[in-house]
């Protein structure tokens, strides 16, 4: 594993100079992701974020420096703050804390994003209706593609429903989010195995996917009814969860 200190000599400075030339309104440049965390592998790209005061000229750039893939985003301080106010779509409902490292900064950049900088997102809200809809599609799928698409939707929406039954946890990237979901302590029986199958992390035939989907649906709804009946703010959903309507709808009673 490598970090920013392992980059070729003066490369960071050359990249900052080029970015300041291409984004004259820039007030800062920070690295984030695996290099900023000291966890870069030979295949990792170098993630950079240009911070501007007004709208950036080009929101994304891709450069290659030898074999190194450099991925650059550019956004205003206002846009970056707006992004941090919404959940990350990839985080499976977990809060995100992705620390960064300034390569160059001004007082305006530090005042806006802090020191160290980085990306943070609040946890996602539980969506019981979405989970039940994905369950219905998976359990009634009439071909393998529909089955696996719906199963993946189940796997992505299920962890948010268990969030408040488990200790708070933040993640840094997609892999971290999946591991956090698999490791949830308060969960239905067979949770980790079924979730891995639904997300496509473990090989399973169509029958195996259907078994995992039905078991997870039945177990999760039963757990929520017992421990968190008001997990979703929709009042009618609470009633439907408590009186068994959702299980009857899915045919998993």
Image (cartoon, helix red, strand yellow):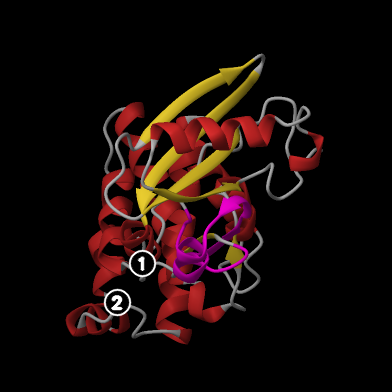
Identify the residue at horizontal 36%, vertical 48% (top origin).
Answer: 75
Which residue is nearer to you in this view: 118 or 208?
Answer: 118
State which quarter of the image contains the N terminus. top right
* Residue 151 picture quarter: top left
Measured as percent of width and height from the top left, residue 115 is found at: 60, 67
Residue picked out by circle 2: 244
State which quarter of the image contains the C terminus. bottom left
Where 66 falls versus 150 (above or below)?
above
Which residue is nearer to you in this view: 5 or 149?
Answer: 5
- Name the element at disc 2: loop
* Residue 59 picture quarter: top left
Q: Point out the residue furthest to the top here.
A: 66
Where 210 falls versus 169 (above or below)?
above
- The answer to whether residue 84 is seen in the rendering is yes
Q: Which mark is residue 217?
A: none
Identify the residue at horizontal 40%, vertical 81% (top origin).
Answer: 225
Identify the residue at horizontal 25%, vertical 65% (top origin).
Answer: 129
Q: Which mark is residue 253?
A: 1
Query: How many C-alpha atoms fall within 10 Å of the one at disc 2: few (<14), some, or many (≥20)?
Result: some
Start and end of the magenta stretch?
91-116
Which residue is nearer to you in this view: 99 or 54?
Answer: 54
- Name the element at disc 1: loop
């Amino acid at each position: 594993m490598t970090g920013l200190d392992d980059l070729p000599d003066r490369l960071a400075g050359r990249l900052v100079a080029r970015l300041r030339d291409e984004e004259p309104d820039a007030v800062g440049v920070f690295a984030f992701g695996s290099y900023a965390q000291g966890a870069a592998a030979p295949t990792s790209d170098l993630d950079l974020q240009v911070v501007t005061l007004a709208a950036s000229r080009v929101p994304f750039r891709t450069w290659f420096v030898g074999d190194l893939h450099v991925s650059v985003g550019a956004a205003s301080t206002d846009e970056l703050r707006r992004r941090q106010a919404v959940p990350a779509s990839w985080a499976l409902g977990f809060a995100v804390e992705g620390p960064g490292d300034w390569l160059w900064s001004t007082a305006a950049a530090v005042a806006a994003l802090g020191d160290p900088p980085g990306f943070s997102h609040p946890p996602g809200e539980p969506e019981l209706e979405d989970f039940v809809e994905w369950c219905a599609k998976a359990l009634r799928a009439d071909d393998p593609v529909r089955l696996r698409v719906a199963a993946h939707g189940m796997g992505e929406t299920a962890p948010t429903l268990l969030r408040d039954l488990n200790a708070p946890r933040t993640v840094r990237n997609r892999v971290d989010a999946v591991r956090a979901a698999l490791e949830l302590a308060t969960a239905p029986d067979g949770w980790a195995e079924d979730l891995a199958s639904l997300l496509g992390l473990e090989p399973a035939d169509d029958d195996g996917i259907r078994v995992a989907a039905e078991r997870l649906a039945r177990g999760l709804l039963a757990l929520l009814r017992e421990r968190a009946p008001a997990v979703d703010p929709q009042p009618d959903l609470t009633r439907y969860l408590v009186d068994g309507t959702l299980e009857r709808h899915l045919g998993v009673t």
